[in-house]
Amino acid sequence: MTQVNWEVHNGEQIEKFVAAMILLRNPHGNLITPSQGDRGVDIQVESSPGTFDIYQVKRYPQRLTGSQKGKIARSWRTFLEQTAPQINISSWNLVLPCDPTHENLEWFKDLTAESGIKVNWIGRTQLDGWASDMPKLVEYFFGDGRTRAEELLERVLALVNNNQSINANSGSTMLDGLLSKVDAISVLLDEVDPFYRYDYEVHHGHIDENADAASFFGSGSHDAFTVCAQIDSDERYLVLHVIPRCRESAQLSPISMDMTLKADSGTAQYEALQNFVRYGVPPQNIDVDITNVVSPPGGLQPGHGTISLFDVPGNDTPLPPLELALTPSADEDTVAVNIERLTAGSGIKEGGWHLTLIDEARVFELIMLFAPSRKTSTFQFRRADLTGRIPSEVISSLQFLRRLSEGGCLDLRVRGDGKVLLSLESSDAEDVRAKSAYGVLVEYVGALAEVQKHVVAPIRIPSLEVLTGSDIDEIVRASRLLRGEQLTATWDHVGVVPRDADNFPASIGEEQVIINERGFYVSHQGQQYDTGRKLRVVYESAQLVTADRSQDDGQMHFVPGHSNRAVVVLLPEEGVAMEHTSAPGSEPQQPTEATGKERPQNQRPLA
């Protein structure tokens, strides 16, 4: 049985150890740091919804003195006066490494009798029993457990660093051997560290390309911190998650350090640091000097580097599903987008604070900055990189941003037109000025989403940096046709292959109507997407300029007659009849039909 020599160790260490045992037995409990006005509570544990067990931890290992009884009595009275009226109490527990004498039990009973609250004296015998169930905690506090944990983690990182030569040519044997060692050591770490557990994953790629806040601190993450190490040059990297075993692990085994953040005046980093100081907005990619590190094994090391800070959602106060609603300044309908994540923080000084909202599609991040008076606010806006995203998943958020760029009343509210939590005017929003740019982006992504409805192959949004105006125009035209619109174009030359060349009725110079039908393929970023539909182009007035079909794959070449207008439409899947007329002033003629993949040359953009 694991024994603790309660008399040998100092009182502060005893209190921390006893608090650790209670909190590890009750992972959702809260540690109240003792201080003047601590309301006589060291630990509170929610025993059932809205009802709490209170634990008052004292360090006294021997028979109580009069002075010690007086301190316990003051804690009890403070609890009755300040805490008991505020919350529902299930029990109040005096916890100390001292079993009560009959005299002490009588005194304790007299002290608490009139409260009507259930009280318990948890003494040495019970604490020894708890300690016997937590040998690694005893070893951590009173043996060499912490040192062993640090050494084990160093072995994990050394294993990774010593295997940087692993590559595709090494085969899987060496990698499997490395991971089996990491797995064995992470299991040992779990056995040694009482406050944190250690999980690891192996990812493909390079850390710099894949490591970001969303990867490591997603909505379901509870990591205290995450360590990344590249296993080989480009193929794989290891992610080690250090996860608290209880809510107060960071208090029991602290994570702290001194950081000096640096930026030159007039730079974007300097402005980011100002917003961090004033409003608490986490800065990204800032030069830092780190000193005086106190951390569980595997944490940050002292030194110079670049650091990015992130808001992490808290779970203490659950919120209902939220939406961000915009009522435009013009007489238009309200639009809303679902909010997936909300975080908040306050500045280091000056009393400002911020609220950060991320939409459900993860298209944008909206940061609201509030001055101390809360009467003034500004916005910062960041749009995510859309490369590789599915068009239909992001179009609603992009449409919201286009409307936001036009100004209006912005409400943060419960989804479904529910209770409004915050209401602001969006006219001061930063970085949402390019109305025309958002209009083009919405039109383009919406067009991609429409095209995707008609093709089987998946379509993704390309890098916007490589898009040209003609790329956008072609997709937009295709989407309009797929929606059933009839478009027009102008042309100056076309080559077609008649269906019945031997009985072709036209003579050189004669005007007539030409109908050209072909399969409709949509070109996008070097790929052809087959829609399974037929495109019909009707050239309203065409003159034959050559009937020599010995070249150009049997094509006959035409130029515009009195009109250079062409009508473009997609045939319904079941096919429809269309009417055509000859040139004004001439006798009606049968339209000439052509087939193939021909298209007008020098065709101007469709209207």
Image: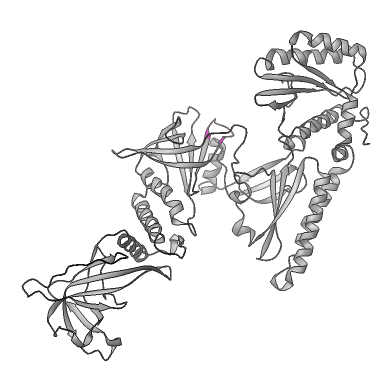
- Judge left or right: residue 256 versus residue 602: right
Give residue 410's position: percent from left, percent from top: 40, 36
Can you say whether 227 is above or below 511 in the image? above
Residue at image location 45% in from the left, 62% down from the top: 459
Q: Nearer the viewer, residue 377 or 69?
A: 69
Give residue 475's position: percent from left, percent from top: 36, 63
Region rendered in magenta: 344-353
How many numbered marks appear?
A: 0
Residue 162 visible in the shown view: no
In the image, residue 348 lies in the stretch drawn in magenta: yes
Q: Give the quarter of the image for residue 164.
A: bottom right
Give residue 472's position: percent from left, percent from top: 36, 62
Q: Looking at the image, which residue sits at the far front?
A: 574
Quadrant location, the N terminus: top right
Can you say whether 497 is above or below 57 in the image? below
Q: Nearer the viewer, residue 554 or 603?
A: 554
